[in-house]
Amino acid sequence: MKKIIRAEFRTDSIDLVNFIIKHFRVFIITGILAAVISAVISLMLKPLFESQVVLYPSSNVVETNTMMGGVSSSTSVFGDDEATERLLQILRSEQIKEYLKKKYNLMEHYNIKPGEKYPNTKMEQKMKKNIHSSKTSFGSVEIRVRDRDRDIACQMANDIAARADTIFNNVQRETASKLLVEVRKSYESQLKLVKMYEDTLKYLTGLLGISGENQGRDLYKAYFEASVTGDRKTESNLEKQLNVFQSNSPEFLRIYTTLESETEYLSHMRGRYLESFTLSNQTLPYTLIVDKGTVAEKKIWPKRSHMVIIATLSALMLLALLLFISDSLTLHRDDAGK
């Protein structure tokens, strides 16, 4: 008849102590070997250094300002949650990644050969592993960069923060430049219209013989004086001027009124033109750096002491499990033999 072997574990403290005493030498040797091997492996690993930059988005990220960049005195210099989300989007954008790839030649720095399979995917994985941007509990944004070169880690962290400000300003200037083209067209068109009305008004002024605001009133006064004195020649000439004045006076007043309103609109367009021109050339602060990145003194990874402790404990636990199973199987075989 076939023997049935069944493993049973007894967990009383006396058996556990006896078990440890019985295999004490094995535990000691295994623990020492695991600690030595894990320590050697940790020494072979190249350390990683980390630099951090802490910054806040400014209110310019979401604030609706005038084209001159004017902000109400009651407006906070710090942006809100929406500004933080936009800043994070910029920090994680392809523009930042491409900038870092070119400046630091990351293909070579990360030992990625262009001819190998999926080089761009490997580059993306490396950057995602070593470069992090996240929102802190205080509403700020933290940039963390890890690298085997502590100086490069520091430079990359600071460059990312500075590049975010540059990208915001580039987007602003590009938008303002397009707006400037349209505003310039409108301004030049309005300027031509005002010039046309001015030329028409000058023509009518010459036609009516008007040289001042009260010229019409003076013309009537001179006509009546000539009538009283009996100066027929002067009266006849003044009568002709009055006929011309009366026939063209409504047109003159209409054009004069229109010119005033069009000149006022031209002044408004000129203000918009100057504002858009200024905005297309100015640089605004979009990030407020609280802590700049500094060169790390200590490595962030690997933690050799943690690695040795975890590896040693794991080896001892695995050994204990195997010895429990081995002793139980041996015990049941002996009982079955009896």
Image: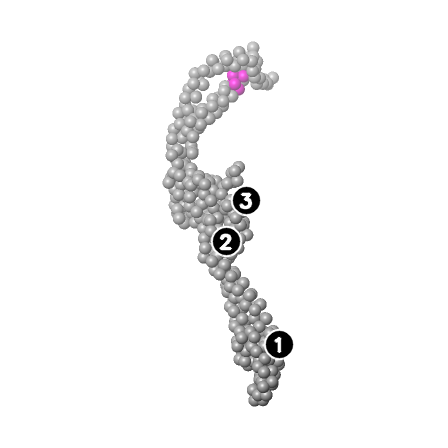
Compare residues 326 and 18 and report the one nearer the observer: 18
Residue pictured at 52% horizontal, 14% vertical: 16
Q: Residue 334's spot in the image, x, y percent?
A: 54, 13
The residue under label 3 is which amino acid type?
Answer: Asp
Q: Which mark is residue 80?
A: 3
The residue positioned 53% from the left and 19% from the top of the image is 325
Q: Which residue is mark 1?
A: 250
| In the foreground, 310 or 255 | 255
Q: Residue at coordinates 40% horizontally, 41% vertically from top-left?
A: 154
Q: Could you say where residue 161 lies in the image, as x and y percent from the top left?
A: 45, 45
SS at badge 1:
helix
> The magenta stretch spans which residues?
324-328
Which element carries disc 2, helix, strand or loop?
loop
Q: CA distance from mark 3 to mark 1?
A: 58 Å
Residue 333 seen in the figure: no
Identify the coloring.
one colour
Q: Amino acid at mark 1?
A: Pro
Q: Which residue is mark 2?
A: 69
Residue at the image point whose x is 50% and y is 13% from the top: 17
Residues 126 and 242: in front is 242
Q: Single out the residue that lies furthest toward the front.
A: 229
Decide if residue 98 is on the left or right side of residue 199. left
Most extreme residue toward the top is 338
Nearer the observer, disc 3 or disc 1? 1
2 and 1 marks in contact (CB < 8 Å):
no
Quarter of the image with the C terminus in it? top right
Above or below, 89 against 9 in this view is below
Dot 3 or dot 2: first in sequence order is: 2
